Amino acid sequence: MQIPLYDLPGEMAGHVEMRDDVFAVPFNEAVVHQAMVRQLANRRQGTASTKTRGDVCGSTAKLFRQKGTGRARRGNVKSPLLRGGGVVFGPAPRSYRQSMPKRMRRLALRCLLSLKVKEGKIKVVQELTLQKPRTKDLARILAALGVDGSALIVTERSQPTLVKSAGNLPDTRVLPSALLNVVDLLSYDTLIATVPALRNMERIWGREAIENASS
């Protein structure tokens, strides 16, 4: 499969060959949804905590006698009905982590990459580098490529100058290809990738990588 290759001024510079086993996979909604829920759940710290009546410090003496006062019967100051008392069925520290087979995680990424190609929401450039951090230069490149919404820029490896340049651009993020994930692919409208980043994606999530992982 071939898609257009662009230069930084936004002109078409040819075509780039892409592997079908990574960028032409049928969309599997169930797997993508499960991968998204897993990633969001694994982000949660699970540190929310409250004190039950057994954890609250205070006297266990009855506040006043049971009968004769005309008031409702009352226990001690730890009662959940009183201010400063314990909490009933409150949150406790727990783990929200979910597991998912590696094959399914890889499939979810390939499904989303293929969907970007199918919808024409991927722009491939030969290389994307800046001599120094400059937001105006990166904004000009995005405008030349026809990006008018959110954009996820994927490079072969980490590029601090690009990350700093995109820091003040709304809805723009720069990632190395090895850290590409389901939530970011769903969160950003346009995917901008360099040719070396594409080759790295094919190496990581291609058929050979799956076979080596399963052997």
Image (cartoon, helix red, strand yellow):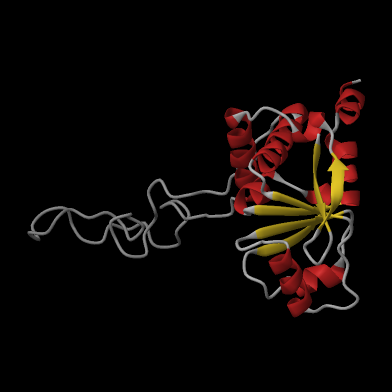
Q: Give whichever of 172, 146 is nearer the camera.
A: 146
Q: Is residue 44 above or below residue 2?
A: below
Q: Quadrant of residue 170?
A: bottom right
Q: Give whichever of 58, 147 is nearer the camera.
A: 147
Q: Is residue 201 above or below residue 26?
A: below
* Quadrant assignment for the C terminus: top right
* Quadrant assignment for the N terminus: top right
Residue at 75% x, 77% y is 135
Residue at 7% x, 59% y is 70
Q: Determine whether, in the image, residue 82 is placed left or right of residue 45.
A: left
Q: Position of residue 85 (x, y in %)?
A: 36, 59
In this rendering, the count of numbered labels is 0
Q: Position of residue 185 (x, y in %)?
A: 67, 48
Q: Position of residue 9 (x, y in %)?
A: 80, 67
Q: Give whichever of 134, 79 is nearer the camera.
A: 134
**Can you name the residue that lies furthest to the top here?**
215
Q: Quadrant of residue 200?
A: top right
Q: Is residue 22 above or below residue 128?
A: above
Q: Is residue 204 above or below residue 62?
A: above
Q: Give whichever of 156, 18 is nearer the camera.
A: 18
Q: Determine whether, in the image, residue 78 is placed left or right of residue 162.
A: left
Residue at 88% x, 78% y is 132
Residue at 91% x, 50% y is 196
Q: Position of residue 58 (x, y in %)?
A: 41, 63
